[in-house]
Amino acid sequence: MKRGRLLGDLRRAIRARHYSPRTEDAYVRWVRRFVSFSGGKHPVASSDRDVGRFLTALAEKGRVSASTQNQAASALLFLYREVIGRDVDRWVPVVRAKEPKRLPVVLNREEVSQLLGEMKGQPKLIALLLYGSGLRLQECLELRVKDLDFGSGEIRIRRGKGARDRVTMLPKLGRRSLKSHLQRVKARHSRDVKSGGGHVSLPGGLSRKYPKASQEWVWQYVFPSPRLRRDEQTGAEVREHLHATAVQRAFRAAVLQTGMSKRATCHTLRHSFATHLLEGGHDIRTVQELLGHSDVRTTMIYTHVLNKGALGVRSPADVLGHRNLSYRGQTSL
């Protein structure tokens, strides 16, 4: 089995199982790195210990995070099991990268408002949905027109993380701006269709089953890219969704503009969504469903970042009298 053919078989096996394109690209990169690490040796000729040495080197020399090492292990396990047809001994000694237990960064409502005030255009609308609906960035970018229900105030997330569908709320605050945005997107889409374009890539095999669906308005992305690209499957010029880096750059610029001291990212808005719901007294199971967590223990991490703790506990220092406790300059230790 030649290397080029191996990677082609790997891609086909991934697509047959309906993994996301990002997972496909990541798995292919890890297989290439493994081959390079092995001195160009084909994975068929590599042993289980070669896999173990590669994963150990990632932790010891590459200093990668635990999640990155786990992704590399999943890629190689998929390669050997599903493509080569050989099981890998999971008990091969591997030095595991340490995974620190970090609490998520959370913004208060005033900080969220300041950030949104510094943003504009599509990135601002996306940031509003990340906070107002609890979406992941990629979930928001992959929204299609048919996923928005203004009548019931709902957003349907199709094949989110873990290939799970879910429903969350569409915040009232941004509905008018979102409708105006969609009118502009629809006008451009109509011009594209009149010029013979207006296509969008479709999930799975829908492009073969419904050849004309790629031009339908309901399948268009809510946040389309300004540029066209050629679809690998159909060969047509398609308009994909806005790239994540465009939103991340705009968000980072807004953080710097506010002078905020917190290390906030786009995902921080999702953390803030969950924390503020719990602060408002909403049931943790409801928050779990809105976030799309498969295990409530994942959602429970937000109880540790509430303003007053999970049980509304007050610090004993807050009930002391204020006499002789005011700061009067330096004190000797």
Image (cartoon, rainbow, N blue to C red):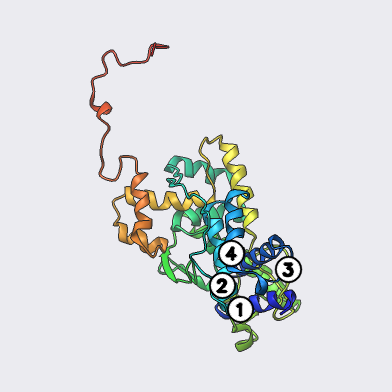
Q: Earlier in the sequence, mark 4 or mark 1?
A: 4
Spatial CA span between label 4 and label 1? 19 Å
Spatial CA span between label 2 and label 1? 7 Å
**Disc on res. 228:** 3
**Disc on res. 78:** 2
Question: Eyeballing the image, is 324 above or below 318?
Answer: above
Total marks shown come to: 4
- Where is residue 148? Give x, y as percent: 49, 69
- Where is residue 243? Give x, y as percent: 65, 60
Spatial CA span between label 3 and label 1? 33 Å
Q: Residues within 10 Å of mark 2 (few under 14, many from 20)?
A: many
Q: Nearer the viewer, residue 43 or 103?
A: 43
Quadrant assignment, res 170 = bottom left
Could you tell me which secondary element the residue under label 2 belongs to? helix
Q: Which residue bears the numbered disc 4?
A: 49
Q: Earlier in the sequence, mark 3 or mark 1?
A: 1
Q: Are marks 4 and 1 in contact (CB under 8 Å)?
A: no
Spatial CA span between label 2 and label 3? 33 Å
- Where is residue 216? Give x, y as percent: 61, 79
**Disc on res. 83:** 1
